[in-house]
Structures are given as C-alpha cells and as structure tokens.
Image: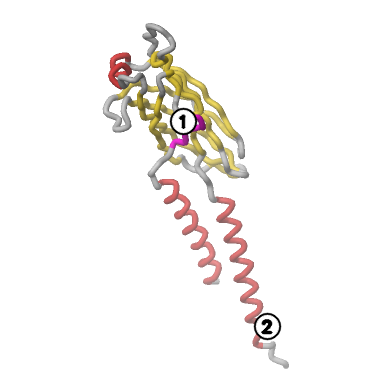
C-alpha cells in the first residue's frame, strides 16, 4: 500500500486549527458586549435664573440620553438611580431621582426626562456670588444584555460627571455631557468571556 503524503496530515491539521480559530473569533464577537453610553442632555435650575426676579424655585429639570451601541444585543435596565450633589467633591447630598427600568433594543436611543426638588439650603450654599454653580451627578443601575434568546447576568453600571451651571440656570456645556466611569467591572467580564472562548479552543485541540 502507498503511504499517504506527509504533508496531507499537516495540511488537514492546519485547516482544522484555522477553522477552529475562526469559530472562536465568531464566538468572541457574538458574546462581547458594550455598556450603554449615558449623557445628560438637559439640565435646568429655574431658581438660578437671574432673569427671573425673586425666584425661590428649587426644582431641577433634567433629561437623560441613553444609547445602546451594540449592533445585535438588546439591554434590560434595572431602575436607574440618579444622585445629585452640591459640589464635585460630593460633600452634600441634594436629592435623588429614579427612572423605572426598561428594555432598549439594539442600536436604539432613549430619552428619559425627569424633575425633582433639591434641598433649598444646599442649593443656596452651592451658588457662587455671580449666580453660577457646579454640581455632580451620579448614575447607578444594573444591566442585562439580550443575546438572541439568552440574557446575561446583571452587570453594575456606575457613572457620573460634574455639571457647570450658568446664571441662567442652564448647564454651560452646550453639547451632551457624557457620564463616565473609572470602574473596570465590564472589562473584567469581557476578559472572562475571552478566557472562556480560549478554554473551549484548547479543549478541542486536546482532541
């Protein structure tokens, strides 16, 4: 009998490893998720508007913008908790506001308006002599990602930003203010998923 060519087995193994690599890449791309991007779109304090004479209004009107940048993954939000502080160092709590949980489809954007009454004393103390002020806003929630018919476990989302307000009670930054986070929890999750995919590849290679 004629022995098979030595290169045939090598080519078969290389083809198998290449196919397995593509499969692993596809799995990684399918399981990889990106957290939603959160913005403060509107921020208005009528009580700081110097054009309104003798205004004692302590209402804050705010509007959030939530964007799901995932191409094929929906997001389930738990209740979204907003916390407001009088200074960037978060020395005093001024108020809280909660947005009910909801589902957001892939590549979708959501606008969530709301209003609340802030602590009058702290609001007065936080206002500079020229009528301007600076606040800090924290957003805390948990999200689950919908990948086809499967839902991931909950992942905490904690972001925040400082907000400068002019003497008309409006945020000074004309564009949306992005809420940012220094937490690495989601990065750890992505690393875990990458390790899982690598483990699957190694198991197949052992066979």
Secondary structure mostly taken by the magenta-highlighted segment of the chain? loop
Q: Secondary structure at mark 1?
A: loop
Residue 83: image location, x then y, percent? 37, 27
Residue 92 locus on image (x, y percent): 28, 25
The span shown in magenta is 173-179
In the picture, which quadrant includes the C terminus? bottom right
Left or right? Give the position of 59 relative to 14.
left
Q: CA distance from mark 2 to mark 1?
A: 65 Å
Q: Is residue 115 left or right of residue 207?
A: left
Of pointers 2 and 1, the one earlier in the residue sequence: 2
In the shown orientation, is residue 130 left or right of residue 116?
left
User: Is residue 110 rendered magenta in the image?
Assistant: no
Write down the residue under mark 1.
Answer: 173
Q: Position of residue 163 (x, y in %)?
A: 40, 29
Q: Where is residue 170, by image quadrant? A: top left
The residue at 61%/39% (across/down) is 107
Mark 2, secondary structure of its residue: helix
Counting labels gives 2
Q: Residues within 10 Å of mark 1 (few under 14, many from 20)?
A: few
Please, which residue is most extreme toward the top here?
54
Report the residue marked by disc 2. 8
The relative height of residue 204 versus residue 60 in the rendered view (above or below) is below
Quick check: 18 above or below 32?
A: below
Residue, far bottom: 1
Q: Please name the residue shown 49% across and 57% down the image.
A: 194
Is the residue 204 above or below the residue 149 in the image?
A: below
């Amino acid at each position: 009998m004629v022995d098979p060519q030595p290169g045939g087995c090598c080519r078969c193994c290389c083809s198998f490893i290449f196919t397995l690599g593509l499969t692993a890449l596809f799995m990684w791309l399918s399981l990889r998720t990106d957290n939603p991007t959160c913005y403060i779109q509107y921020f208005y304090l009528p009580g700081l508007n110097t054009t309104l004479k003798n205004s004692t209004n302590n209402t804050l009107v705010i509007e959030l913008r939530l964007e799901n940048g995932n191409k094929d993954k929906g997001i389930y939000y738990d209740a979204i908790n907003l916390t407001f502080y009088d200074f960037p160092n978060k020395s005093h709590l001024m108020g809280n506001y909660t947005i009910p949980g909801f589902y957001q489809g892939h590549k979708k954007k959501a606008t969530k308006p709301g209003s609340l009454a802030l602590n009058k004393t702290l609001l007065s103390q936080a206002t500079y002599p020229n009528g301007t002020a600076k606040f800090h806003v924290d957003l805390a929630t948990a999200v689950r990602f919908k990948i086809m018919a499967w839902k991931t476990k909950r992942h905490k989302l904690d972001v925040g930003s400082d907000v400068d307000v002019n003497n008309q009670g409006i945020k000074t930054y004309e564009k949306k203010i992005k809420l940012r986070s220094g937490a690495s929890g989601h990065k750890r999750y992505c690393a875990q998923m990458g390790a899982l995919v690598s483990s699957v590849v190694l198991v197949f290679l052992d066979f």
